[in-house]
Structure formats: structure tokens, C-alpha cells
Image: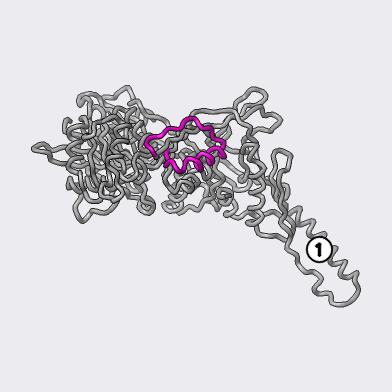
Amino acid sequence: MKHIRNFCIIAHIDHGKSTLADRLLEYTATISQREAQAQLLDNMDLERERGITIKSHAIQMNYKVGDIEYNFNLIDTPGHVDFSYEVSRSIAACEGALLIVDASQGIQAQTISNLYLALEHDLEIIPILNKMDLPGAMPEEVKDQIIDLIGCKREDIIPASGKTGMGIPDIIQAIVDRVPAPVGDPDAPLQALIFDSVFNSFRGIIAYYKVVNGEIKKGDKVKFINTGKEYLADEVGILKLDMAPRSVVKTGDVGYIISGIKEAREVKVGDTITTTARPSLDAIQGFEEVKPMVFAGIYPVDTDEFEELREAMHKLQLNDASIVFEPESSAALGFGFRCGFLGMLHMEIIQERLEREFDMTVITTVPNVSYIAHTTKGDEIIVNNPSDLPDPSKLDSVEEPYIKANIITKAEFVGPVMSLCIQKRGIIVNQSYLTSDRVELVFEMPMGEIVFDFYDKLKTISKGYASFDYHQTGYRKSDLVRLDMLLNDEPVDALSSLIHRSNAYDFGKKICEKLRELIPRQQFEIKIQASIGAKVIARETLSALRKDVTAKCYGGDISRKRKLLEKQKKGKKRMRQVGNVEIPQTAFMAVLKLD
């Protein structure tokens, strides 16, 4: 056991984690020249196209240092704030972390938040200065920032480059010297922590785990403590580039188990595996439940595909434990699911994966967050969907979730960033200069304001230099109203939203104008209205397409024309009563991109 080293790689997005992982795999000869490719551990098409890591990836490397052969278990993690749940799970399975900082960009918001995650679990931190080969690298300044942040010695920081392979031997040596070996009792009853799972259409569900105490053998009867289910371990092994079967996985190792599990709900990430022969009574602690931040409805375009969508969602949930969903129905869209996501990027990725991996075409409704409504009777209602909000006459107050946002930016962009946050109802709490031209701004702002387009706008006004990280701080009372959209006096529930009263008039007017452009004209007049309760606050009218009914009357008496026009008028009136308006998919999406 003393020759095992478990470590993960943490950093801000685009600081070169996956590239550095590639170099480590090449240096330790875990992969041959033939298998080598960029971003080797990112095995999803989406990850390669966008150049981001979405899932954490585990792999084992064997390497001789001196005469001793070491087992390195490396986990490469995502850097985007939406996937920080993946990072927290990876950290739970490690004893050390490589903290990578881009020498040309310095410390960013996500670097700090991932570092705090690692420090909470008492991991040994090895700071690495990456991208030293770039002409824009500022090694000395960035070293000062790292020393300020974690208080290490200057000579502990390893200069490296994922592109050229500089500094890789020093990193390997540092992992051996500084990262502690896993602690655990090989003779105790088995306790293994599940930190990930994948679905394989031939073998069922494969769970990845770290053995904390005891050992797991092929053919053992195992039990999952949280769900109470028992299985036979058909195959156990360790994770190389592919899965490598072994007869036994010992204490401190990271491995996988295949036991023919069919149901997605039976494997819970954070669960503990033990054997039925010598069961351990305690589950492993220290695993947090995921808190979804953004809620949106996902509906199949074709209502017959509801069951297929349900299957697809369960399979996705296995691969991505941070998505939560429950069935709901809407008058405009039929049956679908109310899904909770960790952020807007996460929502976009899930939608893309449903389309690519499961061939499902889906409609996503306007994203929102969950609110707490207090009624006049004193009840508390959790509102995930605007249509759940009680009638205004029964409503006492509404509380909305607030977050603490940390924004790190260059000094020249402080003005625009502040005005953006204040426009989104943010209150500045703190402003501190990290260096002479890097500022950290701390804001308290409502979660509901940042789910639309806040991050994109922040990137635009700061020319891509601002980094953003947030965590939830609790609920506060706000003056919120439900804005309904009506088409010919019929409410469209998929377009309604909860919004602050001060923004409601502008927002209502914008949506009305947008819908007027996007809804195709009919043979009758359509009125588009935005209302709060019974009060209409904005209106647009889509005029009717006129059919020329008098074309066949040439000459003759005027009364013949009048008779035809009267007949047309009656027909239009009847049509308006029975005709319904189809809303195109583009209209639902356009609401998200109003500005």
C-alpha cells in the first residue's frame, strides 16, 4: 500500500489539465505512441469539439522510481464552475492534488474555489506553473500569487509545460515525495466508495470505486449499503486506458466492478460497497448531495416519445450524477420532465447529449430557479415552475435564492463589471486588489438573474478576462411577480416566468415584440399580451392575412360584394373562436436570447 499514490489535477478552465495528463501518461509509458492523441482522457465527442472536460476520468499508471515500482492513480477533472460536483467527487477519492496555474493568466476564480474544495479534504497540494513555453508567461508574478494563496515556499512550485513536456520528471518525483500513501486497514471488512458509474449496453452498469478498507475479490457477494441491494461481483479490476480485470482489488486502489446491474436507480454515487460475508455496518461519510441551481422543462417534440425520453434521462443520470429530474406536464407541450442543472453550460451539454447519444429531439423551456412561496395561511410552498405559484390573493411573500459571486478581473474592466452586476440587482460586498491590476469583486445577487445570459455578458464586457465562481448563500424576500403570456386570451404556460416587479414591464414588452416577429400570420387577428395577474402590461397585435373573396365579382351590383364580405366577416369571427395558434420552437429559444 505504501507504493500507491492517488492524486487528481485541479485548475481553472483552459489552464492545461488534460494536456498535462497526456504528458504524464506518455512519460510513464502507460500508453504507446500508437494510442497517443491530444486530450486522451476526454473520450466524449462533445469534450473534444469544445476542448473542455465534462467528466472526471480515472486511469492507473505504473512507474519505477529508483528500484521501487509505484502505482499512480490519476483523476483528470473538469475546470468549469458548472461541473464542480465532478471535482468534489474526484477529490473524495484522492490524497493529493496537482494545482495547475497558467503562467500567462495567473490565478482565476475557479482555481481558488477548487483549491478550497481540496483543502477541506486535507489533500496535499502540489502547485505547478503550466504553459511556461508561452511568450506571454509571467512566471515570477504568478509565483507571487500562488505563494499568497497557499503559503508554500517558492522552490516548491514546479515550472512545467504540458505542450513541450518540460518539468514532467519533477512532477512525478514530487508526487512520490509529497503525496501521502492511502491509509486503510487491509484486514478490516470491505468498504469501497463509489465515485462514478457508466452504462454499457452489453455489460449493464459499471461502478468505479476507491477501496478504503479491506479488499474486493472476483466472485464475492457484495452489498450496496444505501440501496441495500446485493449482487455478485462478476468482474473486478483496475482502470488502465481500458478496464484491466484482476482477481482482487486491494486497499487504497481505484477500480471497477461489473455485476450485471440493469437499473440506473440502483447505483448511487457516494454509496459504499461492502461484502455480505463480512459486512461493514458504517457507510463512508463526507459525500455531499448535489444542489441543482437552474431548473428547466425538457419535453419531447413528438409527444409519443415520452417513455424513450425517460429511458434516456435515466441512462444520462448514471453517467452524470448531478442531473435531477421529475415528470411534469404542460398544457402547451404535453408530458415532459422538470430537470435541475448545475448551470447554463450544464443544461446545454445535457441537451446536446440527449440529441447525439439518444437521438431525442427535445424542447427546453425557459430556465428558472426554485423559489419559496409563503401563503396567507402560513404554508411554505417550494416553487420550481412559475405555474406552481399560488394566486396573488393567497400569496403573502416570495423568497428567492441568493448567491455570493466572486469575480476576478483586470482593473480596467471594474466599471463595466460593476454596472452589469448592479443592473442584475447585485449588491457589492467587497472589492480587493490581488495584484496591482487584478481585482476580486464579491457580490451578493439573486440566482434568478444569472441563469439567463449573465456569464456570456460578463465575458463580453471583460474581453474574456473575467472569471466567475459562485455558491448559494440562502433565501431572501423579494418583490416577485408571475408574468404570463397570453395568445388570444389563452395563457401559454411554457412561456411564463417569475420576475422582479421592476423588470416585468420591459421584459413583457420585449417578449411581446419578439413573439410578434416569430409567430406565423394566420387568417385571423392574433393578440399577444403579457399580464401580471389580471392586469395586462404589454400588447402587440399580429394582423390577419386577408383572402380576396370579392375577386370573382366583376361589375354588377355593390350588394353582391357586400354579401360576400359579410360572409367572410362571420367566418373570421368563428375562426377566431376555434382557431388555435401554433408556437414554433424558435419562439421558446428566442426568449432566452432577448437582448
The quadrant where residue 519 appears: bottom right
**Residue 539 shows up from this direction:** yes
10 Å crowding of disc 1: few (<14), some (14-19), many (20+): some
Instruction: Say if the magenta span includes residue 235.
Output: no
Q: Does 560 appear above or below 353?
A: below
Residue to which mark 1 is pinned: 568
Q: Residue 168: horizontal and vertical position, in percent?
A: 20, 44
Of residues 228 and 164, which is closer to you in this image? 164
Name the residue rendered at 57%, 52% in the picture.
590
Type of residue at label 1?
Gln
The quadrant where residue 68 appears: top left
Q: Does 277 appear above or below 8?
A: above
- Looking at the image, residue 220 sits to the left or right of residue 371; the answer is left
- Looking at the image, residue 35 sits to the left or right of residue 384; the answer is left
Q: Residue 489: horizontal and vertical position, in percent?
A: 73, 47
* Picture mark count: 1
Residue ranking furthest to the front: 436
**Residue 295 shows up from this direction:** no
Of residues 180 and 431, which is closer to you in this image? 431
The quadrant where residue 297 appears: top right
Report the colour scheme: one colour
Q: Residue 278: horizontal and vertical position, in percent?
A: 26, 24
Of residues 225 and 102, which is closer to you in this image? 102
Residue ranking furthest to the bottom: 555
Q: Secondary structure at mark 1?
A: helix
Q: Quadrant of the N terminus?
A: top left
Q: Which residues are magenta?
A: 408-436
- Looking at the image, residue 63 sits to the left or right of residue 118; the answer is left
Q: Residue 275: horizontal and vertical position, in percent?
A: 28, 28
- Looking at the image, residue 240 sits to the left or right of residue 462; the answer is left
